[in-house]
Amino acid sequence: MPVNPQGHASGQAQPQPISNETKTLVNMIFARFMAIYGHKFKSCFETQDELRLAKREWALSLRGYNESELVVAIDRCKESLAWMPSVSEFLAILQELRGDHGLPASRNAYVEACMHADHPTKHTWSHPAVYQAGKATGWFRLRTEDEANVVGDFNYHYQVMCQRVRDGENLEEAVPMALEDKSDNTLVDFIQRWGEEQNLEPTVAAKLLYYLMKPKGSATRQRFKEIAQKDADALGIQLPEDYQ
């Protein structure tokens, strides 16, 4: 997956511009934290550039929250935290106080996506954002790849979807009918049958046939197939050209 210098997959939507209102609210938050935490706050930022970058990250993360919600969250920090929270800790407090549009925690969302990645349109999702994040990550990846390789991508897509929800977008309207996942599920069924025919473990079969996920006729698909065929040769197996 191509990535840009910020580490996000190329072609993905960029964040919306930060409004003046959000910038003002972030300045208010940091002023409150400076008053609450004193020298502990100042020790978090060695330079003005670090402070400026931190404010921008907070502003990107807090779009969609209003002043009253932020004030309550700051008061919760003052009551329970000895140090200024990270942006993720502050978001967790906001979500706890607000309910956060019914969005589940990132970890719960990831587990749900993995558990139902085999038939995603047959599951009643806890929130459309979980479905959309799973789809953006790739159901096949969620079924077959190790958590360490895929959870970061899922969390990125999930946070994008969460922000879209907070910005007022209705993700329900974007959930497709089951027909859209037909080819993906057909591939899964094929891999399972093919693996059984070759007396292979499911994970081995999925690894060998991973190239079938790439666009047909593409150089990427051919490269992955050539690599997989070398492993298959050691098993005395000829890999299929396609699954349909």
Image: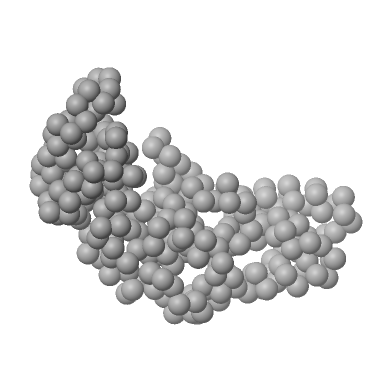
Q: Foreground: 10 or 72?
A: 72
Is residue 190 something that shows in the picture? yes
Is residue 60 something that shows in the picture? no
Q: Residue 31 appears in which quarter of the rendering?
A: top left
Work out which quarter of the rendered image holds the C terminus and state it. bottom right
Note whether 46 is above or below 181 in the view shown.
Answer: above
> Which residue occupies 48% across, 50% down?
153
Number of numbered discs overlaid on the protein picture: 0
> Which residue occupies 45% across, 41% down?
3
Q: Position of residue 61 (x, y in %)?
A: 27, 47
Q: Position of residue 238 (x, y in %)?
A: 83, 59
Q: Position of residue 171 (x, y in %)?
A: 32, 69
Q: Is 59 left or right of 193, judged from the image as shown?
A: left
> Which residue occupies 51% across, 79% down?
122
Q: Residue 41 appears in which quarter of the rendering?
A: top left
Q: Residue 129 appears in which quarter of the rendering?
A: bottom left
Note whether 195 is above or below 30 in the view shown.
Answer: below
Furthest toward the top, the residue is 46
Q: Position of residue 239 (x, y in %)?
A: 78, 60
Q: In this figure, which colouring scheme has been used for the structure?
A: one colour
> Which residue occupies 41% across, 44% down?
8
Q: Foreground: 237 or 96?
A: 96
Q: Foreground: 22 or 200?
A: 22
Furthest toward the front, the residue is 79
Q: Foreground: 193 or 115?
A: 115
